[in-house]
Image (cartoon, rainbow, N blue to C red):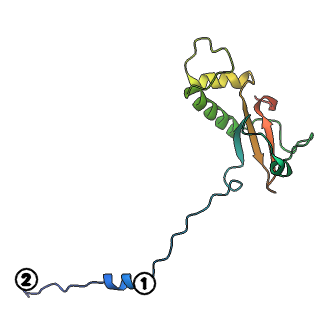
Amino acid sequence: MDYEDDEPQDYNDYQDHYDEEQQPIEEPTYDENTGESVAILDDVMAGTTATETTNSAERTERITTPYLTKYERARILGTRALQISLSAPVMIDIDGESDALKIANKELREKKIPLIIRRFMPDGTYEDWKVKDLIVD
């Protein structure tokens, strides 16, 4: 058998695809409440409006724990260290320290971090906690 004599058959399936109507691709939408259960807010970002007050658990008695979790701590320190590295004003005396993470850690110990933690509840409501109000171990 000699394969050189056989010519390859041309197969063109492109015509079939052009006849079909193209379906639009739907982009997935992001729902803030299904993302993460904790959001970090600046003091300025936490200003409440009439619609936010109905969703928030802005009561004198709180549902969630007053302790800062290790996940919240990691996010707070990372967020604040990024802000400091981008020339945000430092809230403490840094004593010649230049490492942004160490400065953020010192701010957390002294409860001077100007951030608010928003804890989302399963029913869609949330609680806002200032970092200075949380118990840090």
User: Relative to the observer, which residue lies in front, 12 or 78?
Assistant: 12
| Label 1: how many Cα within 10 Å (few below 14, some 14–19, many 20+) | few
Q: Could you tell me how far apart the alpha carbons at marks 2 and 1 are, in whole angstroms? A: 37 Å
Q: Residue at x 39, y 85 (%)?
A: 19
- Name the amino acid, label 2: Glu
Estimate the x, y position of residue 115 in percent, counting from the top left: 72, 33
Q: Residue furthest right?
A: 60
Q: Please state if 42 lies on the left or on the right of 12 as rendered.
A: right
Q: Please state if 127 lies on the left or on the right of 96 as rendered.
A: right
Q: Please state if 73 lies on the left or on the right of 11 as rendered.
A: right
- Name the amino acid, label 1: Glu
Which residue bears the numbered disc 1?
20
Q: Earlier in the sequence, mark 2 or mark 1?
A: 2
Figure check: 68 above or below 35: above
Q: Please state if 53 lies on the left or on the right of 99 as rendered.
A: right
**Dot 2: what SS?**
loop
- Of badges 2 and 1, nearer the viewer stands 1
Q: Residue at x 25, y 85 (%)?
A: 11
Q: Residue furthest top?
A: 95
User: Relative to the observer, which residue lies in front, 25 or 101?
Assistant: 25
**Dot 1: what SS?**
loop
Q: Which mark is residue 4?
A: 2
Estimate the x, y position of residue 43 in percent, counting from the top left: 74, 34
Q: Quadrant of the N terminus?
A: bottom left
